[in-house]
Image (spheres, rainbow, N blue to C red):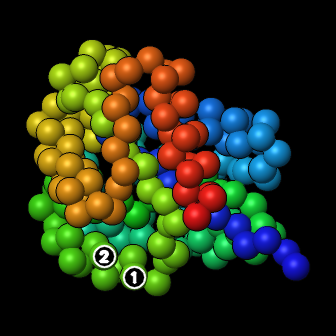
């Protein structure tokens, strides 16, 4: 009988190290004999490519409602065309960002978290969601001259507040992102292996 897949998402503020940690996690799981796959949001599908090209690199931010709807549409497409088929094939899927990013970023822009949840209600819930916790002050030092529309100090502070509330609600498991990359990777791997045993 084919083993059911397992869905993990890694969350965090911009430049928190979540992409590196997502890739390191996939590599570590593969070394341990698991069939793990990396994916990301915005996805590599048509809607995701549109978001990357026309939404993330604008000088002025589009309406948060437009943002939230586009990300929800991309997520639905991502789940149906990439994540579900991989899970059905028994793979461990590690997504660099997922629905919690919409809650944090569009919620920080003033949208109701209940509404964001509602427009994402038909997508899969992850089996495990990890949040890489780094202070906004430390992240700002990592931003280049060309900041994205999201990479503003006040924006990131608001985003972090929502992520912290999701941690308190136990929707996200926090990992200290201010330790060394290797230490954070080991901590994340330990959390994942413990959950895979359950």
Vertically, is 150 above or below 113? Answer: above
Vertically, is 177 above or below 76? Answer: above
| Residue drawn 46% across the image and 84% down it | 122
Residue 110 left/right relative to 33: left
Q: In which quarter of the image is the N terminus?
A: bottom right
CA separation in Å, label 2 and label 1: 6 Å
Q: Which mark is residue 111?
A: none
- Nearer the observer, 190 or 36: 190
Residue position marked by numbered label 1 in the rendering: 121
- Nearer the observer, 171 or 49: 171
- Nearer the observer, 197 or 172: 197
| Residue drawn 56% across the image and 51% down it | 194
Q: Residues within 10 Å of mark 2 (few under 14, many from 20)?
A: some
| Residue drawn 69% across the image and 35% down it | 28
- Could you say which quadrant of the image residue 145 lies in? top left
Q: Are marks 2 and 1 in contact (CB under 8 Å)?
A: yes
Residue 173 horizontal/vertical position (percent): 37, 51
| Residue drawn 82% across the image and 45% down it | 33
Vertically, is 139 above or below 4? Answer: above
Residue 106 horizontal/vertical position (percent): 24, 59
Residue 45 horizontal/vertical position (percent): 63, 60
Label 1 secondary element? loop
Residue position marked by numbered label 2 in the rendering: 117
Query: In this view of the protein, can residue 81 be seen by the observer?
Result: no
Query: In this view of the protein, can residue 169 be seen by the observer?
Result: yes
């Amino acid at each position: 009988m084919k083993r059911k897949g397992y869905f993990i998402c890694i969350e965090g503020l911009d430049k928190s190290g979540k992409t590196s940690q997502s890739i390191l996690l996939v590599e570590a799981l593969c070394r341990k004999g698991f069939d793990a796959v990396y994916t990301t949001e915005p996805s590599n599908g048509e809607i995701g490519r549109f978001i990357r090209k026309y939404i993330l690199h604008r000088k002025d931010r589009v309406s948060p409602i437009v943002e939230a709807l586009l990300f929800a549409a991309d997520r639905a497409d991502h789940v149906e065309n990439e994540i579900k088929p991989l899970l059905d094939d028994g793979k461990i899927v590690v997504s660099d960002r997922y629905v919690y990013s919409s809650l944090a970023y569009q919620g920080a822009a003033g949208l109701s978290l209940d509404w964001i949840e509602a427009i994402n209600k038909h997508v899969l819930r992850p089996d495990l969601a990890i949040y890489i916790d780094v202070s906004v002050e430390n992240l700002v030092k990592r931003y280049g001259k060309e900041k994205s529309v999201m990479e503003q100090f006040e924006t990131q502070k608001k985003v972090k507040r929502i992520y912290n509330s999701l941690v308190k609600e136990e929707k996200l498991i926090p990992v200290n992102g201010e330790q060394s990359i290797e230490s954070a990777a080991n901590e994340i791997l330990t959390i994942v292996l413990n959950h895979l045993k359950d």
